[in-house]
């Protein structure tokens, strides 16, 4: 007797819902409605005669049968996507955080296009892990505080991330910050994406005063930097994000910058690592990051 074959759409819907533990998230990823995901999974369960998901008020968890199927489907879809990529390569996608994109990459990317006019680039704003094949990401700029996925190739850049405190010139004048001890009385800003930022700065400069807690937290570095420019407080930041604002005088760094506990690295997707455009972008990024580090070292002494 011929076996009924589930539809590819149903298998895609189930794999996404099982992986994301949410039908709503699966619907967003696949650009369909929540109802469509639910109908596909219900039809798949009827076809196979087993329950694949346990529906809860906040999540959908795969059953043991569902987990086995989801793992097999994930591997199969990765193989399909990889095969398609090898036959018809798409544009190279570079992933980095929104703050690096806004403050560092966009002001420099025209230089890459001048050097490599035939390379098509797409951008992905993300600072965490990803599935390189499914998300179609070829190369990523990441901080070593983020654990890399098992399948990416990590390329060290050999430089520690330089960190320091910044604020507006007006804020520095009004508060009279001159010594590390003065920071304890300041209004301290921090990014939600790096909750230990103040502790990391304190350790890097061997600060010995009262514990530096956060007064205002911002979802992204770029929001926190804008708040500092507007005089709302003092903030710990990677130097690479504020070089232009320091040069223009929008921000000052009263204690300069020091090497922090983390480094920037490049993650390379294995399925595109040997492509000529990947090599070109990897080389350009490494060169630009090295230049940025060197520019920071000669920017000048701390504000006094």
Image (cartoon, rainbow, N blue to C red):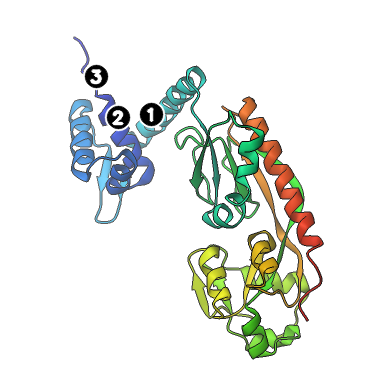
Determine the residue positioned at 66% across, 86% down: 184
Determine the residue positioned at 78% across, 64% down: 299
Determine the residue positioned at 65% across, 89% down: 175
On screen, residue 116 above or below 251: above
How many angstroms separate mark 2 from mark 3 (CA)? 10 Å
Query: Which of these two is toward me, 18 or 282?
Result: 282
- Residue 210 appears in the picture as rendered: no
**At numbered mark 2, what does the secondary structure look like: helix, strand or loop?**
helix
In which quadrant of the rendered image does the N terminus lie? top left
In the rendered image, residue 244, in percent from the top left (x then y), is placed at: 66, 62
In the rendered image, residue 191, in percent from the top left (x then y), is placed at: 54, 68
Rendering quarter of residue 71: top left
Query: Which of these two is toward me, 205 or 281?
Result: 281
Q: Earlier in the sequence, mark 1 or mark 2?
A: 2
User: According to the image, label 1 marks what residue?
Assistant: 73
On screen, residue 232 above or below 15: below
Q: Earlier in the sequence, mark 2 or mark 3?
A: 3
In the rendered image, residue 49, in percent from the top left (x then y), is placed at: 20, 29
On residue 5, the disc is 3
In the rendered image, residue 55, in percent from the top left (x then y), is placed at: 24, 48
- Residue 223 appears in the picture as rendered: yes
Rendering quarter of residue 42: top left
User: According to the image, label 2 marks what residue?
Assistant: 11
Q: Earlier in the sequence, mark 1 or mark 3?
A: 3
**At numbered mark 3, what does the secondary structure look like: helix, strand or loop?**
loop
How many angstroms separate mark 1 from mark 3 (CA)? 14 Å
* CB within 8 Å, label 1 to label 2: yes
Binning the other alpha carbons within 10 Å of mark 1 as few (below 14), some (14 to 19) or many (20 upward) gives some
């Amino acid at each position: 007797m011929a076996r009924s074959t589930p539809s590819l759409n149903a298998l895609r819907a189930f794999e996404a819902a099982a992986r994301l533990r949410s039908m709503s998230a699966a619907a967003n990823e696949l650009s369909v409605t929540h109802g469509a995901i639910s109908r596909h999974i219900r039809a798949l369960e009827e076809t196979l005669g087993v329950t694949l998901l346990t529906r809860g008020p906040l999540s959908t968890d795969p059953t043991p049968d569902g987990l086995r199927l989801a793992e097999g489907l994930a591997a199969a879809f990765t193989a399909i996507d990889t095969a398609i990529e090898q036959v018809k390569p798409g544009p190279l996608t570079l992933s980095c955080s929104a703050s690096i994109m806004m403050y560092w990459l966009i002001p420099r990317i025209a230089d890459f296009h001048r050097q490599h006019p035939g390379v098509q680039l797409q951008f992905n704003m993300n600072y965490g892990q990803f599935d390189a094949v499914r998300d179609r990401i070829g190369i990523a700029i990441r901080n070593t505080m983020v654990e890399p996925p098992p399948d990416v190739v990590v390329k060290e850049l050999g430089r520690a991330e330089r960190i320091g405190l910044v604020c507006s010139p007006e804020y520095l004048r009004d508060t009279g910050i001159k010594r590390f001890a003065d920071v304890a009385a300041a209004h301290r800003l921090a990014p939600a994406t790096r909750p230990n930022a103040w502790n990391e700065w304190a350790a890097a400069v061997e600060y010995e005063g009262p514990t530096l807690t956060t007064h205002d937290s911002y979802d992204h570095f770029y929001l926190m930097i804008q708040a500092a420019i507007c005089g709302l407080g003092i903030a710990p930041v990677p130097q690479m994000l504020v070089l232009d604002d320091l040069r223009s005088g929008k921000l000052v760094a009263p204690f300069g910058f020091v090497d922090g506990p983390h480094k920037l690295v490049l993650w390379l997707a294995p399925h595109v690592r040997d492509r000529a455009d990947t090599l070109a972008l990897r080389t350009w990024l490494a060169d630009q990051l090295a230049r940025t580090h060197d520019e920071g070292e000669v920017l000048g002494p701390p504000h006094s």
